[in-house]
Amino acid sequence: MTINRYLLYFSYIGTRFRGVQRQLTYDMVHNDDPSSVQGLLEYALKQLQPLNTPKLHLSSRTDQGVHSFKSSAHLDLELPYTCHPNKLVFQVNNFLSSCEVPIKLVGAQIVPNDFNARSCAKWRKYLYRLAVLKSEFKDLYAERFVFPIPITEDKRCYFIHKSDFDVELVKNVLPLFIGTKDYKTFMGKSGINTELSTIRTWNNIEIVPGRSFYPTDIDKYYNYWDIRVNARSFLYKQIRRTVGVLIKVAQNIITYDDVKYMFDNPSINSWNTKISTAPSHGLYLYDIGYDEKDLILPIEDNKLEEPVQSESPVEISLDLKKEIVKQRIENRRISLEARTAKSIEKIKNHEFLRSVEK
């Protein structure tokens, strides 16, 4: 048997998970972790009965509560049978659906054995969704205290019930974030790899009008805004802290000069205490890109990408096809009659439905 390296694309709603990355396992015997996206995907892949233990190598590590439209990971699978990527996606999704977990594979392909989903990524795109109360409803909110939030947006968008929000002020500071900078001030505290370089290059950041996932009458109270960021890599909590900065700028709590100071003096001590990190549930990883040449299989392995064909296809006559269809219909009729008879028998024997003897 040969081992193939698969690149998987997947999406998930992160509300119920402790994060995308495997955490300390609950099951030390089988090494399963149902609390993370990675742990559940690896468990689903075990249902394919591979000869090796599936181990995903993630391209991106999102925090607890963060969602993804399209993330990726690679793994090596040794299977006792030929498995086209489409078949892998179908079988894994069937299992995840039966478990009622909010994770879906959205694509798969066989890649070269030296491909790495994390280091080969050329860019990652993130989206942060805001909903800001319109100024004409600020008094109404003060009176009611509890304000309606669409059920379709629960834990999917960050709702701000302060109507002071000047988008033009945000647009003025966005150029400060573009380019190669030291983002140490914008990095969350982490005990992992304290020697990590905090130099990053952001290709773009913008704020544009957004919309609700599913329009309702409640939407009339809010202005939706999408903050989109494009870069190859990010620091721990960098995007959420950046969004926190932009919110305070829009509310005129901090100024352009305050933000510039944090870039001019990169340090955890330069963080403005008036700013709060934006919550995780408004953040989405929505796309990840690779160079096509990194995905091309060697010529001798290209056959692995072809769907499995019958070794000796037989031409079936029209009359034979008709007979096969008739037999299938008859089998279904017999099966239905058997199920119906069984149901009727259960009803007859049910103690509440028995006729009372007089």
Image: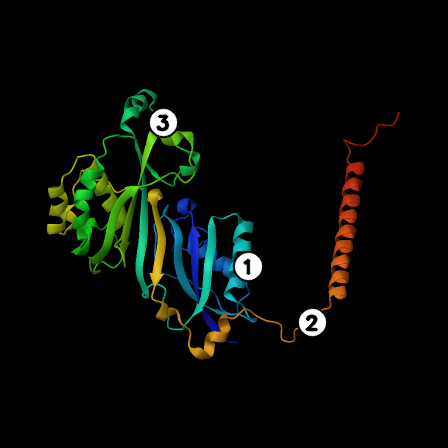
Q: Left or right of 182: which side holds 114?
A: right
What is the count of numbered marks? 3
Q: Left or right of 239: which side holds 102?
A: right
Specify whether residue 148 is in view: yes
Element type at mark 2 = loop
Question: Residue 72: horizontal and vertical position, in percent?
Answer: 39, 59
Q: Name the residue carrying label 2.
A: 315
Classify 83 as above or below 266.
Answer: below
Question: Residue 252: horizontal and vertical position, in percent?
Answer: 17, 35
Question: Residue 54: horizontal and vertical position, in percent?
Answer: 47, 64
Tell me which label, 3 or 2, sits earlier in the chain.
3
Element type at mark 1 = helix
Tell me which label, 2 or 1, sits earlier in the chain.
1
Q: Name the residue carrying label 1.
A: 91
Amino acid on which disc 2 is placed: Glu
Amino acid on which disc 1 is placed: Gln
Quarter location, residue 235: bottom left
Between 27 and 154, the one lying in front of the other is 154
Q: Find the distance from the CA under tag 3 to the CA under tag 2.
A: 66 Å
Question: Badge 2, how many Cα within 10 Å: few under 14, some, many 20+?
Answer: few
Tell me which label, 1 or 3, sits earlier in the chain.
1
Question: Residue 35: horizontal and vertical position, in percent?
Answer: 44, 50
Q: Find the distance from the CA under tag 1 to the CA under tag 3.
A: 43 Å
Which numbered marker is on residue 323?
A: none
Question: Badge 3, how many Cα within 10 Å: few under 14, some, many 20+?
Answer: few
Residue sitting at x 42%, y 32%: 216
Answer whether labels 3 and 2 touch (C-beta < 8 Å): no
Amino acid on which disc 3 is placed: Phe
Element type at mark 3 = loop
Residue sitting at x 18%, y 53%: 184
Residue sticking out furthest to the top? 143
Q: Name the residue carrying label 3.
A: 147
